[in-house]
Amino acid sequence: MSKVLPPPTPDDVIPLTRENISSGRIRDWIAKYDGTFKPLSDEELHSTRAAMFPPSGKPDGSVWLFGYGSLIWNPAFEYAEKRPATVYGLHRRFCLQTYLGRGSHERPGLVLALDRGGCCRGVVFRIAPEHVDSELDIVWRREMITHSYRPTWMTAATPQGPVRAIGFVINRAHPRYTGALPEETVAETIAHAAGFLGPCCDYLFNTVEHLDELGMPDAGLTRLAKRVREIRAADGA
């Protein structure tokens, strides 16, 4: 019999920190909330990371990462440099269901992923050569906890010129990929969902706030955040 626990209470919320990621606490909570949801093993995490750097399996020098959602406002890894950046051919979309971090089995939440088409403005982070092993381990344990994302090399345009960066693109074959949902469905979902990482709406609000601070507002996310606040106000939240 699979193990499914009720939605977390406010006392159950744990922060997405470097320590909670590297210690395995996040993976432990996934096992606690859904015994059938199996995270990638350490061996699988290592092999998917090594596959990004053929033939040796290890990077030669600095590595750039593209952030488009929570990595912008809570990277949880150490970096040497940060730049505003744009990638083309991909856009951010709330298209990945979460029954754990920002939702529950009773009220699944949604988180962002890069999906096909358009463009996306975000941030690239440069990890220095001497910290690549430790910091990529943190990133992989956070983003590749399951096969919901595909780590992908992409060209990110920055004010100082293009850089080759790793970004995390939605795995369209994953059972939690939703495709393009109606905006009202997305708003209702985000307004009401919460998980052990906190309310789903906080994820959206933080992303909008930090994109605004960076001078790269996302009109679609801003409109969505406005609607989520309206729904929550009507519910007395």
Image (cartoon, rainbow, N blue to C red):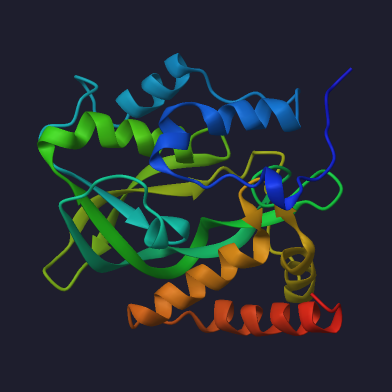
Residue extending farthest to the front is 11
Q: Nearer the viewer, residue 130 or 20?
A: 20
Residue 80's spot in the image, x, y percent? 15, 51
Q: Residue at x 65, y 67 (%)?
A: 201
Residue 145's spot in the image, x, y percent? 53, 32
Q: Residue at x 38, y 20 (%)?
A: 47
| Relative height, residue 236 to residue 16 (above, below) | below
Q: Quadrant of the N terminus?
A: top right
Q: Is residue 37 visible?
A: no
Left or right of residue 235: residue 226: left
Left or right of residue 119: residue 154: left
| Relative height, residue 7 to residue 44 (above, below) | below
Quarter of the rendering containing residue 158:
bottom left
Q: Residue at x 65, y 78 (%)?
A: 224
Quarter of the rendering containing residue 141:
top left
Q: Nearer the viewer, residue 143 or 167?
A: 143
Residue 196's spot in the image, x, y percent? 66, 45
Residue 62's spot in the image, x, y percent? 13, 42
